[in-house]
Image (cartoon, helix red, strand yellow):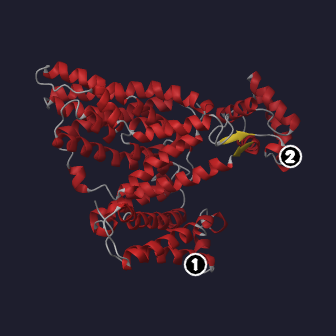
Amino acid sequence: MIYTRKSPALFMIGLIMLAIWYLLESGILSGYIGHLGGTKYKYAGEIAVVPLYFGIFSAIVGAWQWFGTHKEGNVDYYLSTAAGAMFILLIAMLVRWFLAPEIAVISESFGKVGNTGKYLHKILGLNYVVLGIVTGIIIVNVFRIPGWAENGVRLSRLGLKTGVILLGTLYSAAELKNLGGLSIIMIGFFVLGSVGLVLWLGARAKIPSSMGGVLSAGMGVCGVSATVAAAPVVQAKSVEIAYTIGTILLWGVGCMFVFPIVGHLLDMSHVQFGAWAGTGILNSAQVAGAALAYQPDGIETLKVAEIFNITRVLVLPIIVLWLAVWYVKREGVESAQQVNVARVTFEKFPIFVLGFILLFALSTTGVFAPANHYKGKYFGNTAASGFKEENLLKPGQAVLLKEEFDKVQKQDRKQALQRLIDHGKVMSMEDDDVLRGLINAKVVSEEASRVLKKAHKAVRHTAKKIKAFRDWITWLFAFGLVGLGMQITVSSMRQAGGQPAVIGGIVGAIKAVLSLVVVILLISETV
C-alpha cells in the first residue's frame, strides 16, 4: 500500500485552481475568454464553480499532506490518492477550458477543409477528450508520473467505471428496446465471429492453445476484463496475458484516434458512430474515449456506444464456457486442469456492468425522470409540464410547413404534420416520433426541418436529475480519460509480441471494417 508522501504538490495544485477561479471572477481573463469564443464560449459557468470548490479542497488537504504527521491507516491511505486525482483533474480543466478552444480558434482561422464543410480540428477530432488523452500519454512517456501522484492516477479507472454506471440513469426501457435488440444481433455476430477467427488463425500459426484462447477472449469480447476472466480457463501464462493486454492496448489506442476521424469524414450520425465504436473497439475505456472524441459536447454517442459495449460484456459467460470446452477438447482432459467455470465467471465479471443495470432498472421506474423518458428527456406540451407559449409556431413557420405539406407522402406523417400546424405545437409522443422520422428522411427543405426540430425541442425537456447526472458523467469521463492516457506507455504496447500482435491486428481490422459496413447500411439516425 502507498501512503501519503510529504510534498507541497497538492497544495500548489489547489492554489493554481483558485487562481484560475479568481482570474475569471475578477475579469482579468475576460479578454482571453472573448478570444476563445466570447458569448459562444461554453465553459464560463464551469470555471466559475469547479476550480473554486476543488481548489479549496486541494489547498486544505495539501497543507495537511505537506505539514501534517502521517501514519499508516485507512484515512491516510485513501487521502494519499488526492494529489494524483487533483493532478489529473487540473490537466483536464486546462485542456477542456483553454487548450482545446485555442486549437479550435487556430483551426477556424485557416477556414474549412476543401469541400468537406468542416474545420481541420473537427475532422481530426482535436477536442478536449483526444487532447486530454494525448497530454496524459506525453506526461507518462516523456516526463513520467511524479511519485506523489502515482496512487491517485489509478483512480482514473474508477472514474471511467463510475461514469458508465451513471449512464444507466439516462436510459429507459422505451429507448433500450430499440437499441438493445440491434446490439444483441450485431454483438452476437461480431463477438462470436472474432473469437472463432482468432482461434482459427492461432491454430494455423501454431501458437499455444492457451495463448490463442486468452487472445480470442480479449479481441472478441471486452478487452482486459475478458482476458482476465478467460486466463484461468485456458491456463494462460503470465507472459501470454501480457501479450494479449499489449495487443489490446496497441490496437485500441489506434482506434481511439482513427475511428473519430473516419466518422467525421463519413459524416456518421451519433447513433451510427456509437454502434460502430461499441462493436469495433475492444476495451470499455477505449470505447468511451472514441465516442466522446466524436461528440465531446454531448453524450448521445457515448450512450449508444456503451449499450453495445455492455451487451458485449454480457456475452462473456458464454465465451468463457466455449473456451473451457474448446480447451479441454484440444488439450485433452489429462492436461487440462479442472476449472470451475461458473466461479471464474462470477469472480471476474465486471462489477460496473451490474451497477449500470441496477441504475437502468431504477431509471425505468421513473426515479430519475418520468418512466417514458427518451435520452433523459420527457415529453410535455402543456404549461404545467414545462412548455412555454413563446415556443408555439409563428405564423410564418406555419405557412412554410403548409407549403411543404405536399412533399410528405406517408399518411401518419401527414396527420402529425397537420396537427402541428393546427395547434402550433407537437401534440403527442407518437407525433413527436413520427416528425423526427420525417426530419431524418430529409423529405422537406432544410428550413422546414429546422422548424420541425425547434418544435421537437419545445416539447422535450431534460429532467433536473438527469441534467445533473449528465454533468457528472462528462467530468468523470474527462477525468478518467486523462488518467487513461497516463497509463499508456510505450513499453506496455511493446508487450504485444510478434504473432499475437499480427493475429490481433488482422482480426481487429476485419471486425472494424465489417462492422462499419453493417452500420452504414443498416443503421440510421434513429433506431
Q: Circle 1 sits in a helix, a strand or a loop, which is it? A: helix
Looking at the image, residue 117 sits to the left or right of residue 68; the answer is right
Q: Circle 2 sits in a helix, a strand or a loop, which is it? A: loop
In-front residue for pair 29/413:
29
Write the residue at 28% across / 27% down: 341
Query: Residue 451 placed where, x, y %?
Result: 76, 43
Q: Is residue 45 above or below residue 234?
A: below
Label 1 sits on residue: 22
Q: Is residue 467 above or below residue 138?
A: above
The answer to whether one can see residue 75 in this image is: yes
Q: Is residue 117 above or below residue 34?
A: above
Q: Which mark is residue 229?
A: none
Label 2 sits on residue: 394
Q: Quadrant of the C terminus?
A: top right
Q: Amino acid at mark 1?
A: Tyr
Give the mark nearest the N terminus, 2 or 1.
1
